[in-house]
Amino acid sequence: MHKDQGKTGGVKGCCTKRCLYFVGCTTLLCVSFGFVWNMSNDTWEFTSSKVSYITRNTSHGTREFTSSKVSYIMSNHILEDLLQIELPRMTYTKPQILKPSRSDVLMMTPWFAPIVWEGTYNSEILNEQFRRRNVTVGLTTFAIKKYTVFLNKFLETAETYFMVGHRVNYYIFTDRPEEVPKVPLKEGRNVVVLQVQNYPRWQEISMRRMELISYYSKQQFINEVSYLVCVDVDMRFNDQVGVEILSNLFGTLHPHFYAAERQSFTYERRPASQAYVPRDEGDFYYAGGFFGGTVLEVYKLTKKCHEAMMVDKANGIEAIWHDESHLNKYFVYYKPTKILSPEYLWDDDLGRPEILKKRRFLALPKNHAAIRNK
Ligand code: UD2
């Protein structure tokens, strides 16, 4: 009896242990699944598309998937935490709490996103933090039809001023790959030409950038770079544009509107458009020609803007400033984590106001009639 009981008890005990083990494992699985799922639907979508992408291209897909999934999650959710990077001994001027480095401009938004102006940051510290993370930055630009004429100056000046000392991939979207100039590149920097179709209207070319950036973010950029910087091509770099701009999601104050009141912002004002912004909303007016962030955030932004433009198209409406209007709508409801001052996108036709200590990225004069739709 005791034996039986013991046996039965033993069997029971064994059964209970197995049950507990089973319940435990199931709970663990559910919890981890929930964690991944909860990180966001886009994350999930991204990781599942990565499986097929990597499996297609390698013989040991599963292992690579696991590690790249981890590094993907790292690059988008953990690497932002710069405080986890141990720095070497460094000597520099101490920050002064009672003497702010700039008193003539706003340095922080009400949601605690820094606004980047000359004099507000220390490049030495930032460069060290980003170098230790071995960050690679992707710079995307479009040179469709005649806009290839801008590539030479764009690339040459980027080699002098853009992310100096860091790894860079230039992603050039063009319909004319043969017209991409061979510019000498420093170590760790590459030009990647992505051949894409053109469209008859310049407005459509400008707007389709959102679709293409979102597509390539998911298919390619996520495997190659940590951050994306997306800019116009009819520009030249004129001073340092470095890692101080990098953050989860950043936009740039439009040089025409940085000091303007909300009512003057040229947001889309027709409620029929997906880009509509009511007159009593909006913080700043951002330029369409300079935005970026981690690949995941840029993917989310460009996907949402593209989808909104497709809804508008189906409804026979086009936003007043095309992709720029949709970008501005996005930033009203998904606040950027860093904002670049107009130093990062300036037009010399606007003169040189006192607050502008640097003109880092300058619009080139262009003859619209000669260049657009050609
Ligand atoms: C502003 C914005 C731009 C976009 C546009 C929408 C700035 C500095 N620029 O520029 O980002 O939001 O308004 O109306 O904020 N492109 C070609 N081939 C073409 C036409 C355009 O490659 O035939 C590309 C090229 O990279 C160009 C960009 O699209 O820089 C924007 O076009 P744009 O510069 O002609 O437009 P613009 O100056 O009105």
Image (spheres, grey):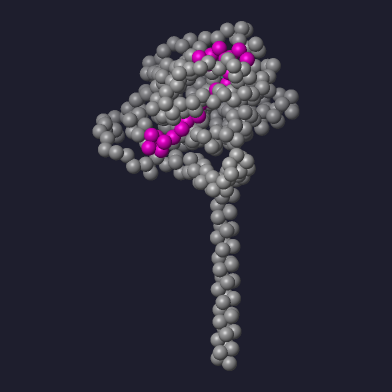
Q: Does the magenta stretch include residue 8?
A: no
Location of residue 145 in the rendering, given as x and y in whole percent from the top left corner: 63, 15
State the extent of the magenta-drawn residues as a range. 130-152
Residue at (69%, 16%) from the top-left corner? Answer: 200
In the image, residue 214 lies at what x, y percent? 60, 32
User: In the image, what residue occupies the spot 42% across and 23% down?
Assistant: 186
74, above or below 118, in the image: below
Which residue is drawn at the image coordinates 57% and 24% (left, top)? 193
Left or right of 319, for residue 343? left
- Judged left or right of residue 353, residue 298 is right
Residue 133 magenta-drawn? yes
Name the image quarter holding the C terminus: top right
Report the quarter where the N terminus lies.
bottom right
Q: Residue 56: x and y, percent?
A: 62, 41
Total residue callouts:
0
Q: In which quarter of the image is residue 110?
A: top left
